[in-house]
Structure formats: structure tokens, C-alpha cells
Amino acid sequence: MNRIDRLTAILIQLQGKKIVKAAEISDRFNISLRTVYRDVKALQEAGVPIGAEAGTGYYIVDGYHLPPIMFSKEEAAALLTGEKLMAQFSDISNRKQFGLAMEKIRSVLRGAEKDYLETLDDNIAVLRARPQFEDMQFPNRFLTEIQQALGTNHVIKIDYYSLQNQDSAREVEPIGIFYTSNYWHLIAYCRLRQGYRDFRIDRIRKLTILSHSYNRNNHPSLQTYLEERRNKEEAPSYLVKIAIDNEVMRFVHDQKYYFGLMEETVVGNKTELTFLQPHLSYFARWLLMLGRSAEVREPQELKTAISDLVKELHDHYQ
């Protein structure tokens, strides 16, 4: 990257955060701190109002903005891909907001980039494992409101329909949101239950952002909460060794990675696989689908689990 491009990129980086440390700039562009100081000084001499706080970092004085940004073809293509992902893995509210943002982005693209995007648009697709079903009881439009409450530290009131088929009204203090297994989840402190709860956002019937706020410092960050939850849920892991006929391995595809694959070795007409697996019953059900093409080498507990499943099926169909 030449210096002109780097100076522009540094300016964009400074506008993206309230405070940017010199070390962050140094790491991003792989330059020395001395070069960072020279580049910032060059921007200041060019008329960019950059302030500095000793021991903290650099900041752009309020009110200064770059003129409309030009995107490269690669950046525009990445944004288009993001739009496709948002259409499939976000909710109605966020899809609408992202669509509006993309309209603004397209408005500042040069003609060549617009033509490039139009060419790509029909040739990029993101497919879900299963289709989404809209339900009038669950309007699926609250992701934007939850993000707003998170950003302003406001309490929200939700009408929630639990997986146990129970309706309840809750006032909660949102901690964070995450996406997993085809659903968005809200982690929040529930004032009714006096504890942290995991709410599936698609099961919220109604949501209201209340006028009163909460102290964010009273709660852990989302990453801290999820890490603590993972540590609590961790079960003793078993070292699993199996062998699968080579001709069947093509049907395994990426499934082996979902079960914690550690090692894979082809030995003759079989492929030996080693896993670290905490849930033997779940693993046993997967191996059962492979029939006689799979052989368990260890542990004995896995062999027993498969035998129990086979006996259960045998008794069921007798």
C-alpha cells in the first residue's frame, strides 16, 4: 500500500471509532509507531482536525466528515454478499434497514462498480438449510429494536412465548444477541426471574423499549457470559477412534468436523478417524446411520451405546 492510500485508510479508521490508539494503526498497516506519528502529522498539516489524548489515542474533532467514499469493485462485491446473507439470516427489521443502507451505498458507487454489482447480483445466492415460515403470532421484527436498546442501555418489555408453550410478560435488561442453529437469541437479565435468560427472538410476540435505563456495568459482556456458560455445560470428553470404509467416506462430507475431528488417516481400504467427543449417545446415533461401514475401535462405552440403540430399535419393531 502506498502512502497516499494509507493516509486515506487511516483517516477512515479514525472516523470509524471515537478513539483510535496508535498501536491499532500500527498493527493494521504493519508500520512502526514512528511512521504512525508521521502519518498523523501529515493529515493534520493537510487540514484534518485530529486531536490527541496522551496515553489514550487519536480522535477526529466532532463535525468533520469525509466526502462520499468510493468503493472498489472487491469492496462492493463484499457488501453485496453481506446483503445476501442478511436477507437469509436476519429478521424482517434488520433486512429492511440493511436494504436502505445498501441503497445509500449504491448511490455513491461509480458507474463501473454499479454495472459490476448488477452482473454479480443474479449470480450470488445464499441458501438456508430450511425455509423460514412467517407466523402472524410472531412478527419477527424486533432485532433492530433490541439493538437500539443495547446501544442506549434501555430496559425492554417483551411478551414471550416459551418453548414450554407458556406466555409471559417480562422486563429485561439486554446483554447481547447472537445467532446459532438458524435462530437469533437474546441474552438478558430477567427482572421477573432475577437471573440471566436466553430468549429466542423469533418467539417474541411484542416488544416495547421502556423509558428507563439500566447500568451496563452491573452485567458481564456477552462474550464473558457465553464463555462462562460453555464452561458450565462442558461434560467429560471421550477420545473416540473409529474406522470407516473408504467408499463410504464421500457420504460423510463435513459431518466429521461437527463431531470434533482431531485426526484422519487412510489405512488400506479404511479411513481411521479420531474425535474428542463429550456426547457419546449423540455420536452413536450418527454412527448408526453408517451401518456396518463403520467400526468402533474405542471406547467401550461407545460400543455399548450403539448396542443399546440397536436393541431399542429391535424391540420397537418386534
Image (cartoon, rainbow, N blue to C red):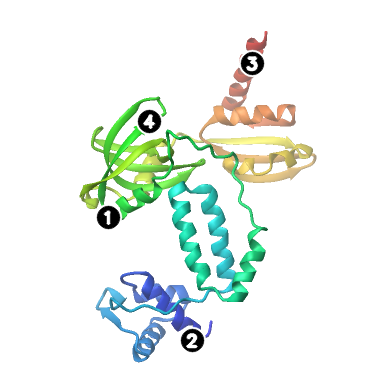
Query: Number of labelled discs?
Result: 4
123 above or below 76?
Answer: above
Q: Which mark is residue 152?
A: 1
Q: Amino acid at mark 4?
A: Tyr
List x then y, in percent, for residue 215: 21, 50
Closer to the camera, 65 or 115? 115
List x then y, in percent, for residue 34: 38, 85
List x then y, in percent, for residue 213: 21, 50
Q: Are marks 4 and 3 in contact (CB under 8 Å)?
A: no
Q: Which residue is mark 2?
A: 4
Closer to the camera, 63 or 223? 63
Q: Which residue is mark 4?
A: 161
Element assignment for label 1: helix
Circle 4 or circle 3, nearest the eye? 4
Earlier residue among tags 2 and 4? 2
89 above or below 232?
Answer: below
Distance, label 3 to label 2, CA atoms, is: 70 Å
Circle 2 or circle 1, nearest the eye? 1
Distance, label 4 to label 3, CA atoms, is: 35 Å
Distance, label 2 to label 4, CA atoms, is: 55 Å
